[in-house]
Structures are given as structure tokens and as C-alpha cells.
């Protein structure tokens, strides 16, 4: 007798949604494969007994792949070779039908890792979209966990269900989808303080801070996925004001692939840049207030009247003098574009409002604006009354 755990049988593996039995063995009819040609172009197809693949690199029948091992190479009718592989989850998410924008794999991986989505966790997802993030969350919680996905639009929910069931080969036992607003659905769907993780992927996540705080267990993680800096700022400030969460942390991730060819190793010219911001914070124990922050906010970070000014968000103010100079430059450029000449044979006048009074300027040789009077050269230095703006 040994203490080693029993080895799972093939039948046990087949019962697992998306388990080893679906990822191993020869390619089968009805499953999805990713075809890659010699130019690196990707094609996702579902193998069928009577299927036929056609591309710029030739064609072949699906029956030539069915029964062959994963990672096989097929020669098309035109003599080109193509590679067939089962798609990874990241490949599937980017190629599946979309009703709404998907959470990119780079962000889904950050959510699973930084949100500490563990096997058996009770997770709530608000904003199911096309189901891309749902598949990553279900893979993380496993059969013993539970994922409640709440979606406001029924058509989006239907698309997500179709995509998720296609990936897992049927309904996932840990997944529950409900249509409606999170504020209405969540109180009746879970017990207070029973949820381990909540992921908010919606336009205004700050509207659901109260209901999320009631559902989260002490120490539970709240994650928000937002697209713009204004959403980011609003969510963070409202989370602080609620005094029910720890100090929020925010970041974004960008992925840059590399070109690899012999000694020519360099970054690719294209990259996956900004897709969204991630914010995490944790639920405090009931009746607890967060410790006071010791660091001071940046000067001007909070306007006294609550209204934002350009300086509050780090923008430099623009002087009237600089605006007048830019207007002159734009007028000079428009004249040059219209005439095709850098200098004009005669003065061209333009009237510009400068406060209550009106001044008249002319464009002299070289297109440089000057006070009315004798024209001056474009190389003439600025007058002392109007020095060059060094800002």
C-alpha cells in the first residue's frame, strides 16, 4: 500500500471542462485548429469531415488533418506547407466572434495574477462582454469555484455564453450568467461578505462601490478595468472617499514583440500599447477606517471648488502672448501654402483682436508678422516689447 494519490483515468479527464483530454491526442473533427502559413498569417478553422481549407497558399481537405497529431505540417495543393496547432486561450480570445470589445490576454493575465484568482474562489464579474475574461477566470477558479457574470445586455450575454461553451466544449459547472445591473442582481445572488474577488469592467465602476463592499469578504480584492484617465481618477477618488477599501493601486501594461532573424534582433515596429488601466483595492474589515495617508498630495491636485483646471492635471497654462504668436505662425503658413512662396510681393494685412482694442498687423518679407509700417526681414530679432517665448 502506498500513500500516492490515484492516477486520474481518461474518463476523469474527459469530464473536466477544457481539461487534458480536450488538449491532448490527435486532432478530431469538430474541434478548432489554428493554421499558420509560411508568411505567418493565421487562420482559425473548425475541422469537419467534409471541410475544405482555402488560402493564398493553396488548399487542402480537413480530412488530411483529422487523426493526425497536434503540431502537424500539411502540404497544400500548390506545394506550400502550413502548420496546424490547437489554439491557445489567448489565440482563441483574439479570433472568436465579438459582440463587445474583449479584455486583451495581456490584461486578463494581469487580472488573474494581481487579483489572486485562486482555485475554488468565489468571483463576481460585472460586464461579461464577449466572454474573453470569463474564460480566464473560469480556468483559474476551476470546477470547485464559482464565477457569477453579470451583463446588462442580453445579446452580449448570449454571445459570451456561446464563446465560453465553445472553448470548454459545453457548459462550465462553475459558471453562472445573469442579465441585469450589478446593483440589482448582486444583493440577491450572494450572501453579504461571501465573495472573494470582484472584477468590474464597465463604464462607471464607481457606481457599484457600495454593493461591492457589501458582497466582498474582509480582505477581498476589488479590481476595476477602465479605459480612460478620467474614469481612473473618478474610481480611485470615490474608493478613497468610501473609507471601505485600502489605498488603490493602478497600472497599465504594454506588450512589445521582437523581430528575430539571425543577428537582426530588434523590437517590432508595432506593439500592443494602451488597452486599459487596472486598479486594485482590498475590502477593509467592517467598522474599520483606513489609516491616514502620510504623504501629501501633489500641489494643486485637488481644486478648492472641486472643478478641474488644466494645472490640476499637469498641463502648463498658455499665455496670451504665445497664443498670438501661434496665430501669426498659422496665418503665415496658410499664406505660404496658398501662394507657394516664402515671401510676398506686397503687404498682407490681418486684423487680430487683443482684448478690448484692435491691432492691425502685416506680413512682411518671409511671412513674418510685424507692426504696420516699414516691412522687416524675417531674420530681424524680436522687439524688446515682444521677446521670444522660451516656455
Image (cartoon, rainbow, N blue to C red):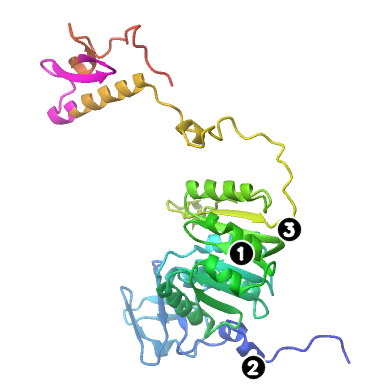
SS class of the residue under badge 3? Answer: loop
Location of the N terminus (image quadrant): bottom right
Question: Against 357, is 105 above or below?
Answer: below
Q: Quadrant of residue 108?
A: bottom right
Decide which of tag 1 and tag 3 comes sooner along the chain: 1
Picture disc at residue 286: 3
Q: Which mark is residue 11?
A: 2
Residue 384 is situated, as x and y percent measured from the top left of the image, at 35, 6
Residue 280 seen from this side: yes
On the question of residue 115 being in view, the answer is no
Q: What residue appears at the point 28 percent right and 10 percent down from the top-left corner?
A: 380
Of mark 1 and mark 2, the one earlier in the sequence is 2
Instruction: Please rate how many residues cluster around mark 2, counting C-alpha atoms within 10 Å: few if below 14, some from 14 to 19, many from 20.
Output: few
Using the numbered discs, state the Cα–Cα distance from disc 1 to disc 2 in whole angstroms: 34 Å
The boundaries of the magenta stretch are: 335-360
Local packing at callout 3 (Cα closer than 10 Å; few below 14, some 14-19, many 20+) is few
Amino acid at each position: 500500500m502506498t500513500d500516492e494519490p490515484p492516477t486520474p483515468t481518461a474518463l476523469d479527464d474527459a469530464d473536466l471542462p477544457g481539461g487534458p483530454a480536450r488538449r491532448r491526442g490527435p486532432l478530431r473533427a469538430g474541434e478548432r485548429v489554428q493554421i499558420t502559413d509560411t508568411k505567418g498569417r493565421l487562420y482559425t478553422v473548425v475541422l469537419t469531415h467534409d471541410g475544405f481549407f482555402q488560402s493564398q497558399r493553396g488548399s487542402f481537405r480537413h480530412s488530411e488533418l483529422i487523426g493526425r497529431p497536434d503540431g502537424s505540417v500539411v502540404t497544400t495543393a500548390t506545394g506550400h506547407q502550413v502548420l496546424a496547432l490547437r489554439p491557445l486561450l489567448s489565440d482563441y480570445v483574439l479570433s472568436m466572434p465579438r459582440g463587445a470589445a474583449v479584455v486583451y490576454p495581456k490584461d486578463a493575465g494581469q487580472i488573474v495574477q494581481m487579483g489572486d484568482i485562486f482555485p475554488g474562489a468565489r468571483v463576481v464579474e460585472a460586464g461579461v462582454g464577449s466572454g474573453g475574461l470569463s474564460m480566464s477566470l473560469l480556468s483559474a477558479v476551476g470546477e470547485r469555484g464559482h464565477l457569477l457574470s453579470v451583463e446588462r445586455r442580453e445579446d452580449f450575454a448570449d454571445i459570451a455564453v456561446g464563446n465560453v461553451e465553445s472553448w470548454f466544449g459545453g457548459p462550465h459547472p462553475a459558471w453562472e450568467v445573469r442579465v441585469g445591473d450589478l446593483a440589482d442582481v448582486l444583493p440577491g445572488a450572494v450572501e453579504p461578505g461571501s465573495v472573494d474577488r470582484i472584477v468590474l469592467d464597465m463604464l462607471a465602476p464607481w457606481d457599484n462601490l457600495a454593493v461591492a463592499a457589501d458582497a466582498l469578504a474582509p480582505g477581498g480584492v476589488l479590481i476595476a478595468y477602465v479605459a480612460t484617465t478620467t474614469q481612473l481618477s473618478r474610481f480611485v477618488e470615490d474608493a478613497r472617499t468610501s473609507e471601505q477599501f485600502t489605498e488603490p493601486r493602478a497600472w497599465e501594461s504594454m506588450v512589445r514583440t521582437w523581430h528575430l532573424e539571425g543577428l537582426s534582433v530588434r523590437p517590432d515596429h508595432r506593439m500592443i500599447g494602451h488597452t486599459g488601466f487596472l486598479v486594485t483595492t482590498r475590502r477593509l474589515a467592517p467598522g474599520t477606517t483606513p489609516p491616514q495617508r502620510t504623504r501629501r498630495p501633489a500641489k494643486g491636485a485637488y481644486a478648492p471648488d472641486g472643478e478641474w483646471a488644466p494645472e490640476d492635471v499637469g498641463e502648463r497654462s498658455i499665455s496670451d502672448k504665445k497664443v498670438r504668436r501661434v496665430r501669426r505662425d498659422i496665418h503665415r503658413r496658410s499664406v505660404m501654402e496658398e501662394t507657394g512662396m516664402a515671401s510676398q510681393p506686397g503687404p498682407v494685412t490681418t486684423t487680430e483682436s487683443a482684448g478690448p482694442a484692435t491691432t492691425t498687423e502685416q506680413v512682411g518679407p518671409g511671412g513674418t508678422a510685424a507692426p504696420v509700417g516699414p516691412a522687416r526681414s524675417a531674420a530681424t530679432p524680436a522687439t524688446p516689447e515682444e521677446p521670444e517665448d522660451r516656455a
